[in-house]
Amino acid sequence: MRNFISMKDFTKEDILEVLRVAKELENKNEELLSKKIIGSLFFEPSTRTRLSFTSAAYRLGAKVLGFDSPDSSSLKKGETLRDTIKMTEAYSDIIVMRHNRDGAARFASDISKVPVINAGDGSNEHPTQTLLDLYTIEKELGRIENKKIAFVGDLKNGRTVHSLTKALELFNCEFYFIAPEIIQIPQYIIRGMEKKGIKYHISSDYKAVLKEIDVLYMTRIQRERFENIEDYKKVAGTYIIDKESIVGKCKSEMIILHPLPRVDEIKIDLDDTKHAKYFEQAANGVPTRAAIFSIALNLVEVSKSKVKKVDIKESEKIICKNERCITKFEETNNKYIVEKEHMYCYYCNRDITK
């Protein structure tokens, strides 16, 4: 059994094994999950993630149960996430969950007897999106190693960016973080990169780097993540790319990715250019998530890497200050991780200071 919660749990070898299995399963309908039941718990709206997980399950012969809105669950009656997970594990062989609280997936995996797959937890991580992003980069560019990636848009709240950055660090990539200051990449991610000696650049101008980069990773500015609507209005519409601003001004082989949905940040006149790969990217969610199901349920053989050792501690006094952390909404043991002199929340990955 294996949970898919955070890219921090994966080695480079683990990632390559997922991509290998995904390639083997692409365009195949195999009954690997015959007689298996998938518990699909989406506490937040989703189109691509939910449907691609469901498609992958059906293609492998599984059945799917669950909900796509908390309004159709007992959460509306006041049920805790803990109890929802305990009930779902009784009805299914594996749980796919999207939740609006940072760290909810880690919490769920701790209490579940069946594997848990993180389909996005608040503004924390989205590891399965990362794996399909990596699959797309490898498929379109031939390899992932040593690529230059520019992330543009809401980097503070972009869980897809957070997870993909963690993964690409393993492939010796160079990063360009393009965003207004109030939604720039979080410091805890930058601090981790500096410790590893990874090259990165902070900027607000994507046009200056178009000739340098291999991947332009656009993100929408997420209104739902802003606590202050005025802050959202200040940055809404900051980055809008179209055919005129991209074609002929970038590397010939540069690709444009986007986790979708887009709002106005990518004009439709880019869709039919050779650079636009976001629809192919979304389609790659099916074989990638089929691989994830198969690996999590031990239905395919993969090379086993050494489990990373982490120093997990508990304390009633050392508390995560992230107001969106699951520890503020569920009864937990106040776990935190010590990495050299750095402490961060076991659940949501945010820095903890004494």
Image: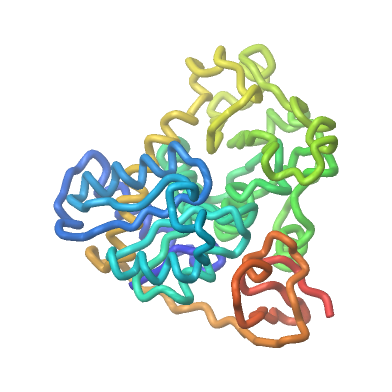
State the image coordinates of residue 152 (x, y, percent, origin top left): 69, 36
Q: Quadrant of residue 295?
A: bottom left
- Display coloring: rainbow
- Judging depth in this view, the residue of 31 and 81 nearest the camera is 81
**Residue 86 visible at all:** yes
Give the quadrant of the N terminus.
bottom left
Q: Horizontal placement of 32 versus 270: left or right?
A: left
In the image, residue 21 sits, relative to residue 49, either above or below, namely below
Report the residue that reaches farthest toward the front: 77
- Judging depth in this view, the residue of 169 and 117 nearest the camera is 117
Q: Quadrant of residue 229?
A: top right
In the image, residue 87 sits, relative to residue 65, either above or below, namely below
Residue at position x 75%, y 50% in the image: 185
Q: Quadrant of residue 58?
A: top left
Residue at position x 43%, y 36% in the image: 282
Give the quadrant of the C terminus.
bottom right
**Residue 143 visible at all:** no
Q: Horizontal placement of 150 versus 6: left or right?
A: right
Q: How many marks?
A: 0
In the image, residue 302 sits, relative to residue 175, either above or below, namely below
State the image coordinates of residue 77 (x, y, percent, origin top left): 50, 58
Residue at position x 15%, y 59% in the image: 35
Q: Horizontal placement of 37 versus 85: left or right?
A: left
In the image, residue 266 sits, relative to residue 346, either above or below, namely above
Q: Horizontal placement of 29 versus 68: left or right?
A: left
State the image coordinates of residue 300 (x, y, percent, origin top left): 23, 63
Residue at position x 83%, y 44% in the image: 182
